[in-house]
Every structure is written in structure tokens, then in C-alpha cells.
Image (cartoon, rainbow, N blue to C red):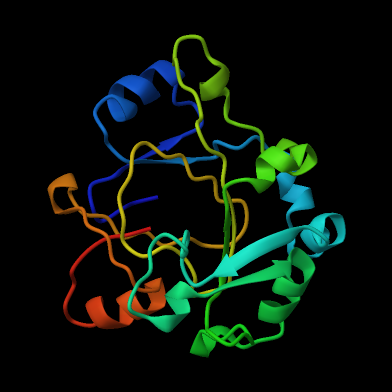
């Protein structure tokens, strides 16, 4: 796999010591392919049908951007959060055509971004255990917050910045936009609006 922005792409043979010394300590992003083991339960349990069957009754807050209650942007959608079951949420965006960013809700591209559900639901958390890096005594790594994300095409986080983060993609495709640290910034509008305003000929840069 090649990237066009100078980001290393490694495979699962990357050692914990290398991961820490080359990337964590130097704040360098890296893509690690095949990090999740082939027998990870999420491969089976988190398909759209199985996720609905096993966890459809779980309640989530869905909004146009993560932590919308904290980051009130100028867009009305960014200030609105809806409580929904996982099954209703998945059913809503499954039956829609994604080419217009519609999910059948009052606002487009609602996104589940939950920082508590994996702590409250051990079986869901056990489906995607942390990589061995975090159990290695040589890495000295720990996790402060586990987050669970689900969304249709066009959903996601607007440009932002924070400390170290590990993102595990189980199903689908995730597009990243990255800036050098000195150019890091927050945008307080939903990501689809940011894409329309900043990626059509302006090329301002990054996000997640």
C-alpha cells in the first residue's frame, strides 16, 4: 500500500519497541495493516447484520459530529443529538441512497461516536481486544478512553487535534486528511460541510 503524504505503512510484524520508538515517541502517524488478528471476534460479530442482531437494542447518541454538546458549531445539525437504538440507526442509513449524504434523518450523516459503551458492555469490548502492543511490558502503553464509532458514507469527525490515538477499522473505508502539527486546528462544522467548502479547489488540508 502506497501513500502520497509520506506516512509509513507497516504490517503486523512491527514490534512494540519499534512502534514506541519510531512513532509514539516522535509523534509520527503510521498505518499498520493486518494488526487485528484473523480470529478477532469483531470480524464476525460486527458485520451489519450481526451487529444489529447481537447489539441492536443498545442505546446510543447520534449526532452530526462527535461531542456536539461541547463543540457547538454554526451549523444547526452540529448542535443536535438524537437518542437511538443501534438497530434503528443502522436500519435508517441502510435503506438510503448515500450519494446525497442522506440517512433518512432530519439532518444528514448522523454519526455514533460513543466513549462509554465499551466500558458498559464488556461483550462488545471483547469483540475487538487491544493489540498486543498494549500488553507488552516493553511498550509501557496504556489506554485512557475506548470509543466506538459507526456511521454511513459522509459521516465522521471534522478537522481536530489531540494526543496519541489508535484507530481500528473493522468494516468499511475511512478517509483521513492530515496536516503538520504546526497547522493543526479545529473546525466546528460537520465534516461533509467541511469537505464541500475546503476540498473543492481550496485544498486546506486534514482531519479525521
Does residue 187 show up? yes
Considering depth in this image, is 156 or 62 the residue closer to the camera? 62
Rendered residue at 52%/75% (across/down): 80
Q: Residue at x 55, y 39 (%)?
A: 34
Q: Is residue 39 visible?
A: no
Which quarter of the picture shows residue 84?
bottom right
- Nearest the camera: 160 or 198? 160
Left or right of 55 in this view: 73: left
Q: Residue furthest right?
A: 53
Q: Name the residue: 60% across, 68% down.
A: 62
Expressed as whole percent of the image width and height from the top left, the position of residue 102 reads 56, 86
Q: Which quadrant would residue 183 be assigned to in this image?
A: bottom left
Residue at the top extreme of this rendering: 137
- Front residue of 53 and 10: 53
Locate residue 47: give its quadrant. Answer: bottom right
In percent of width and height, residue 78 lies at 44, 74
Image coordinates of residue 4 in percent, x first then y, are 25, 56
The residue at 49%/71% (across/down) is 155
Q: Position of residue 115 (x, y in %)?
A: 57, 47
- Number of callouts: 0
Whether 145 is drawn above or below 57: the answer is above
Residue 72 higher or lower than 123, as above or below: below
Q: Look at the image and tell me in which quarter the C terminus lies.
A: bottom left
Amino acid at each position: 500500500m502506497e501513500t502520497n503524504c509520506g506516512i509509513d505503512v507497516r504490517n503486523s510484524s512491527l514490534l512494540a519497541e519499534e512502534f514506541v520508538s519510531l512513532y509514539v515517541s516522535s509523534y509520527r502517524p503510521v498505518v499498520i495493516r493486518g494488526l487485528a488478528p484473523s480470529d478477532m471476534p469483531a470480524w464476525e460479530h460486527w458485520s451489519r447484520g450481526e451487529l444489529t442482531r447481537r447489539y441492536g437494542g443498545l442505546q446510543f447518541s447520534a449526532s452530526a459530529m462527535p461531542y456536539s454538546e461541547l463543540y457547538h458549531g454554526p451549523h444547526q445539525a452540529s448542535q443536535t443529538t438524537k437518542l437511538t437504538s443501534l438497530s434503528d440507526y443502522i436500519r435508517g442509513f441502510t435503506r438510503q441512497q448515500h450519494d446525497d449524504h442522506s440517512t433518512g434523518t432530519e439532518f444528514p450523516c448522523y454519526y455514533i461516536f460513543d466513549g462509554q459503551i465499551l466500558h458498559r458492555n464488556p461483550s462488545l469490548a471483547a469483540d475487538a481486544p487491544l493489540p498486543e502492543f498494549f500488553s507488552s511490558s516493553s511498550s509501557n502503553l496504556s489506554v485512557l478512553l475506548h470509543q466506538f464509532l459507526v456511521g454511513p458514507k459522509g459521516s465522521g469527525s471534522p478537522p481536530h487535534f489531540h494526543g496519541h490515538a489508535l484507530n481500528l477499522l473493522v468494516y468499511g473505508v475511512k478517509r483521513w486528511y492530515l496536516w503538520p502539527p504546526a497547522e493543526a486546528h479545529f473546525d466546528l462544522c460537520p465534516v461533509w460541510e467541511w469537505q464541500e467548502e475546503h476540498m473543492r479547489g481550496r485544498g486546506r488540508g486534514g482531519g479525521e
